[in-house]
Image (spheres, rainbow, N blue to C red):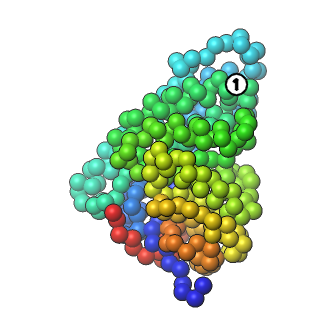
């Protein structure tokens, strides 16, 4: 491209390695002026490791042995009901953090137009992460009901996004099954709440469970979201990860076929201590995607060392321009 591409907005993908919601909100808005349309509470404390804090939600008898579960009970020997699944706690955390958000907004710390972002996982992600495969079909509907119960109060905190992580599914066909589940979640979101999707390959130690060859599968999922879920609730944004070593145009080539309508694309191409690489990834993306896009990290930052946060935020600020809030 002849003209240099400059993204116009920053998305914080949930978790931030700081100590409190107040510290997260104040720090993010200070370092990224005019670049945030929504701000999370940072999923601090016991929530910093994505879904790990949900481990105790499930009956120990069905938990995978690697997470402390014991020998599986014989199928059918125990009947499980909603009372066997503990409340998720997502609503309590969202409401508490929203009180902090409101206090800061009233004090003028939060500019007009900035919304509070609440991040929740798809039930499939949590159940598949902790429950033995044989019991997933029994436990998933119960956990989904618990999460939907938590979603209603969380909407009062201006809920912001749904996670759609990659897991090896226990059902087939996979894609229709995933969208069947997401449809139930999306239907529970009020019309005046903005909704976005974080498409994730999952990671351990900042390494994807599966390394994407390019953005083809991500584009397919995003286009399906717009074709299926956007009809139920308008989509505000879609986030896609970009591995650190992918500065090549080939990775972004499938973005030519991305159809997001009015939704905004955020590319997770910001990596700590790598401003030069970030700029290369931005320019490579611009060869395939002609519309304006925003930037983010690949996934949540909760597991990053705190000393790397400054680098990430500084890079986000330096490679973007302010974006008017609607």
**Number of marks present in the image shown:** 1
238 with respect to 152 (left or right): right
Image point (31%, 44%), residue name: 99
Vertical relation: 8 (above or below) 222: below
Q: Nearer the viewer, residue 253 or 62?
A: 253
- Residue at x 60% of width, y 63% of height: 258
In-image side of 74 versus 83 (left or right): right
272 left or right of 77 in image: left
Quarter of the figure with the C terminus: bottom left
Residue 157 in the image, given as x and y percentages of width and height? 36, 44
Residue 32 falls in which quadrant of the image?
Answer: bottom left
**Under tag 1, what secondary structure?**
helix
Is residue 95 visible in the rendered image? The answer is yes
- Above or below, 277 against 298 in this view is below
| Quadrant housing residue 67 | top right
Residue 229 placement (x, y as % from top left): 52, 47
Question: Is 276 placed above or below 212 here?
Answer: below
Residue sticking out furthest to the bottom = 2
Q: Looking at the picture, how far across and down is residue 315, in whole percent?
A: 52, 73
Q: Which residue is mark 1?
A: 135
Point 73% across, 30% down: residue: 133
Q: Is residue 75 above or below residue 177?
A: above
Inspect this view and state whether residue 49 appears.
no
* Image coords of residue 70 (percent x, y): 73, 23
Q: Residues within 10 Å of mark 1 (few under 14, many from 20)?
A: many
Residue at 72 percent across and 29 percent down: it is: 132
Q: Quadrant of the N terminus?
A: bottom right
């Amino acid at each position: 491209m002849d003209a240099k591409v400059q993204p116009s907005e920053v998305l914080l993908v949930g978790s931030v390695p700081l100590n409190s919601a107040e510290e997260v909100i104040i720090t993010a808005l200070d370092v990224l002026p005019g670049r945030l349309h929504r701000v999370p509470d940072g999923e601090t404390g016991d929530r910093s490791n994505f879904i790990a804090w949900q481990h105790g939600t499930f009956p120990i008898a069905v938990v995978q042995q690697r997470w402390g579960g014991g020998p599986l009970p014989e199928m059918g020997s125990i009947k499980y009901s909603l009372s066997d699944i503990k409340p998720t706690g997502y609503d309590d955390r969202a409401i508490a953090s929203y009180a902090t958000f409101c206090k800061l907004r009233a004090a003028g710390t939060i500019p007009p137009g900035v919304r509070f972002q609440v991040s929740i996982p798809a039930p499939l992600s949590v159940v598949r992460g902790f429950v033995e495969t044989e019991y997933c079909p029994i436990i998933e509907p119960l956990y989904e009901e618990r999460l939907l119960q938590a979603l209603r109060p969380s909407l009062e905190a201006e809920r912001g996004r749904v996670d759609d992580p990659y897991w090896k599914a226990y059902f087939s066909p996979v894609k229709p099954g995933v969208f069947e589940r997401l449809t139930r979640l999306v239907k529970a979101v009020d019309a005046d709440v903005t909704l976005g999707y974080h498409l994730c390959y999952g990671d351990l130690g900042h390494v994807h469970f599966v390394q994407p060859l390019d953005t083809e599968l991500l584009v397919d999922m995003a286009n399906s979201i717009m074709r299926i879920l956007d009809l139920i609730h308008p989509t505000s944004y879609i986030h896609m990860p970009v591995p650190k070593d992918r500065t090549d145009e080939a990775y972004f080539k499938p973005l030519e076929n991305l159809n997001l309508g009015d939704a905004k694309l955020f590319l997770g191409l910001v990596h700590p201590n790598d401003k030069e690489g970030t700029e290369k990834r931005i320019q490579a993306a611009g060869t395939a995607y002609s519309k304006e896009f925003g930037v983010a990290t690949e996934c949540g930052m909760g597991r990053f060392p705190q000393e790397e946060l400054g680098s990430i935020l500084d890079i986000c600020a330096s490679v973007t321009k302010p974006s008017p809030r609607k």
